[in-house]
Image (tube, rainbow, N blue to C red):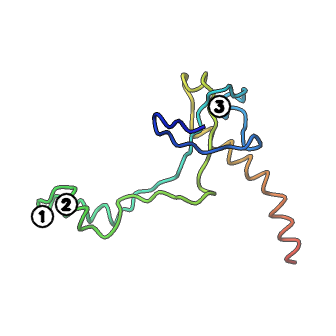
Amino acid sequence: MPDEKFNLKTTGLKLSELEPCNFCDGPLRSVFRVIEVKHAAVNARNANQTLAMASGFGFGLALAEVFSTGPGAEVLENAEAVTRLFCCQDCLCGDVNIAVACERVNERRAKKNQPKEIEEHAQEA
């Protein structure tokens, strides 16, 4: 259902991939949000090097980043490291705790994958 007028790009979701709202466990209506949470961490070595060049040599931050050896932060892109949350319109307008929702989703994912891991170890033995 891409909208050519506004040049919107869409990604399809199978019905089997849909879950209830991860914040209230309520149903999703016709319009809802999909939130993908990725883990990130500051690369202290690169950040310190860049900031030292920016302040010590009088470079602006943009110029110091050009001469830096790498990014100041790393974002995990592995599919296993991304948590997909479904959020209904009611929760979107309220107070939600993304960390708690991520933990619940990841616990469910671990329980779902646990029998597969046990079977794989049994076959290896």
- Tag 1: Cα neighbours inside 10 Å, few (<14), some, or many (≥20)? few
* Mark 2 vs 1: CB contact within 8 A: no
- Amino acid carrying mark 1 in the image: Phe
Q: Which residue is mark 3?
A: 23
How far apart are labels 3 and 1 at the CA level?
Answer: 48 Å
Q: Position of residue 39 (x, y in %)?
A: 52, 52
Q: Earlier in the sequence, mark 3 or mark 1?
A: 3
How far apart are labels 2 and 1 at the CA level?
Answer: 11 Å
Q: Which residue is mark 2?
A: 63
How far apart are labels 2 and 3 at the CA level?
Answer: 42 Å
Q: Which residue is mark 1?
A: 57
* Side of 78 where 27 appears, left or right: right
Q: Earlier in the sequence, mark 2 or mark 1?
A: 1
- Amino acid carrying mark 2 in the image: Leu
Q: Quadrant of residue 90?
A: top right
* Above or below, comparing residue 26 to residue 114 in the picture: above
Q: Nearer the viewer, mark 2 or mark 3?
A: 2
Q: Nearer the viewer, residue 75 or 49?
A: 75
Q: Earlier in the sequence, mark 2 or mark 3?
A: 3
Q: Position of residue 105 (x, y in %)?
A: 68, 44
- Amino acid carrying mark 3 in the image: Phe
| SS assignment at label 2 | helix
